[in-house]
Image (tube, rainbow, N blue to C red):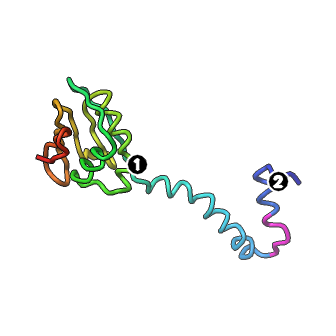
Amino acid sequence: MNLDCPSDRVLGVLRGVNSPARAMSRLLPCLILSALPLVLSSCAVKQTVAPLSSRETLALNADDVVTIMRRAGFSDEQILTLGTDVRNCLAQTGAAMIQVDGKCEAIMAVYGTHIHVTSRRCGSFIYDVSSYFVL
């Protein structure tokens, strides 16, 4: 019996089974485990950072990104996940749009030494990079 073949694996699980109830009790855990990745992927929160075009760009350090994203209402986990992409977008294109589950959560744009932020949760604010101050 070749256990690389799916039908042989099923037959191996069912070997020695005399009743349908016993067969189901052996197959059910296999079916649940095989469906688990599909269920988890459909429940996952989709988070993306999209670059937007702007006239100016600015390279931020990690402290600036954390301060801006915390003020905009993002969790520490979201900052870890999205922070690098936000920084790269602001440095390369000058603006970034953060989407969570298809909804725009925040838009950030560079203007001189300021980052203008509009957040769904926390409203709008301006972050002055030169003085590390939120206006």
In the depicted structure, whether residue 21 falls above or below residue 85: below
Which of the labelled discs sits on residue 51, or is there none? none
How far across and how far down the image is residue 48, in percent?
A: 36, 42
Q: Is residue 17 inside the magenta stretch?
A: yes
What residue is rendered at 20% in x and 23% in y? 55
Side of 62 where 37 appears, left or right: right
Residue drawn where x is 19% and y is 50% of the image: 120
- Amino acid tagged 2: Leu
Magenta-drawn stretch, dominant element (helix, strand or loop): loop
* In this rendering, the label closer to the viewer, 2 or 1: 1
- Occupied quadrant, residue 31: bottom right
Q: Which residue is mark 1?
A: 81
Q: For this view, does 46 lie left or right of residue 118?
A: right
> Label 1 sits on what residue type?
Thr
123 relative to 87 in the view: left or right = left
Which comes sooner in the sequence, label 2 or label 1?
2
**Looking at the picture, how far across and down is residue 97, in whole percent?**
27, 39
Q: Residue at position x 63%, y 58% from top?
A: 34
Question: Is residue 7 magenta-colored?
Answer: no
- 10 Å neighbourhood of mark 1: few (<14), some, or many (≥20)? few
* Picture coordinates of residue 84, whole percent (x, y): 38, 41
Task: Specify whether 132 is left or right of 100.
Answer: left
Nearer to me, 12 or 46: 46
**Mark 2 crowd level (few <14, some 14–19, many ≥20, 10 Å Cα):** few
Residue bounds of the magenta highlight: 13-18
How many numbered marks appear?
Answer: 2
| Position of residue 9 measured from the top left corner of the image (x, y, whole percent) | 78, 57
Whole-number angstrom distance, CA of label 2 to CA of label 1: 39 Å
Which residue matches tag 2?
3
On the rendered image, what quadrant is the N terminus found in?
bottom right
- The residue furthest top is 55
Vertical side of 16 occupied by 92: above or below: above
